[in-house]
Image: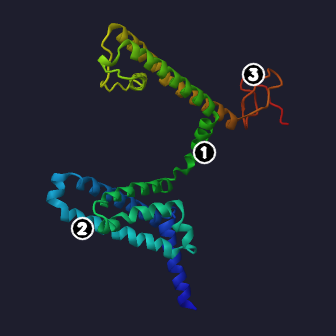
């Protein structure tokens, strides 16, 4: 009866180290794991440099195989110590761990696919568990809710931009014409989008004075257009924050509202709020 107990204790200890970051051993395990992931990504980056790879190819390959074996052992250990292996295998992190481990083995069959080991960067998502960044998930949920709340306004805005680019593309096609590079309305629309977004590749530019005047207006208009979606989302975030941090109770003295949820006194006149 003692052997199964020791076996169970062994699996429990390994489970706590591998799956939990609350213990010192668990934190060190995840930190070492992230260092190994970063090292693997660095090796892939160095291997992509032809001059460096030509001199140290064998050394880089040995290191990469060492890290791959380490990740393989870690992957199977995670499966062994958990009561229901399928829960891990088909979980979000389980799929990521599999995708991060398999590319090096695939490269033995399909040449040139070893660079897929860069997928190991996905495993860096575990940093959320190590640094306890889950406390910020509430703020991320507010951001998602704000984006959903403002989706109609953003859709109308994007549709308006699409109409503007059609008009500008048509005007520039008529003003500049094919001789100045505006060979078609779709091609002119491409110029309008590049100019409105203030990217300015420079591969297509107006040559006539009137075309340059229109371009100047479009450039100035672009700055305002960039600010619009930011204002829409910011307004929605503010409304979301007020929704989560305030209640609908109104001051009986001055009728002020939007009080903080646990407020006892009015933020405007200082009157004690009705407890009911």
**Label 2 sits on residue:** 62
Q: Is residue 55 visible?
A: yes
Q: Distance between the residues labelled 3 and 1?
A: 32 Å
Q: Residue 241 location in percent, x, y? A: 64, 35
Whichever of callouts 1 and 2 sits on the residue coming sooner in the sequence is 2
Mark in the foreground, 1 or 2: 2
Instruction: Tell me the SS state at disc 1.
Output: helix
Q: How far apart are marks 1 and 2 (CA)?
A: 44 Å
> How packed is label 1: few (under 14 Cα within 10 Å), some, or many (20 or more)?
few
Horizontal arrangement in the rendering, residue 207 relative to residue 167 (left or right): left
Q: Residue 66 location in percent, x, y? A: 29, 69
Horizontal arrangement in the rendering, residue 180 relative to residue 127 (left or right): left
Q: In which quarter of the image is residue 140?
A: top right
Q: Is residue 150 visible?
A: no
Whichever of callouts 2 and 3 sits on the residue coming sooner in the sequence is 2
- 87 or 37: nearer the eye? 87
Residue at 34%, 66% (x, y): give it: 106
Q: In which quarter of the image is residue 123?
A: bottom left
Horizontal arrangement in the rendering, residue 213 relative to residue 78 (left or right): left
- 216 or 169: nearer the eye? 169
Q: Are marks 3 and 1 in contact (CB under 8 Å)?
A: no
């Amino acid at each position: 009866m003692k052997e199964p107990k020791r076996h169970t204790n062994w699996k429990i200890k390994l489970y706590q180290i591998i799956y939990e970051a609350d213990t010192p051993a668990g934190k060190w395990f995840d930190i070492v794991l992230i260092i190994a992931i970063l090292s693997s990504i660095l090796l892939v980056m160095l291997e992509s440099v032809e001059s460096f790879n030509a001199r140290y190819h064998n050394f880089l390959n040995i290191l990469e195989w060492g890290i791959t074996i380490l990740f393989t052992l870690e992957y199977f250990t995670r499966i062994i110590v958990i009561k229901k292996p399928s829960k891990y295998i088909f979980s979000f992190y389980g799929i990521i761990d599999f995708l991060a481990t398999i590319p090096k083995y695939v490269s033995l069959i399909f040449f040139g696919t070893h660079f897929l080991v860069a997928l190991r960067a996905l495993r860096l998502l575990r940093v959320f568990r190590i640094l306890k960044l889950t406390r910020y998930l509430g703020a991320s949920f507010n951001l998602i809710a704000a984006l959903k709340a403002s989706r109609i306004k953003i859709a109308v805005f994007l549709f308006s931009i699409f109409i503007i680019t059609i008009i500008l593309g048509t005007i520039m096609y008529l003003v500049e014409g094919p001789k100045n590079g505006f060979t078609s309305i779709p091609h002119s629309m491409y110029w309008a989008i590049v100019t409105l977004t203030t990217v300015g590749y420079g591969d297509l530019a107006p040559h006539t004075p009137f075309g340059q005047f229109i371009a100047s207006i479009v450039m100035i208009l672009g700055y305002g257009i960039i600010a619009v979606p930011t204002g829409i989302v910011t307004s929605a975030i503010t409304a979301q924050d007020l929704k989560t941090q305030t209640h609908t109770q109104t001051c009986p003295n001055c009728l002020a509202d939007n009080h903080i949820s646990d407020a006892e006194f009015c933020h405007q006149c200082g009157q004690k709020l009705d407890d009911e």
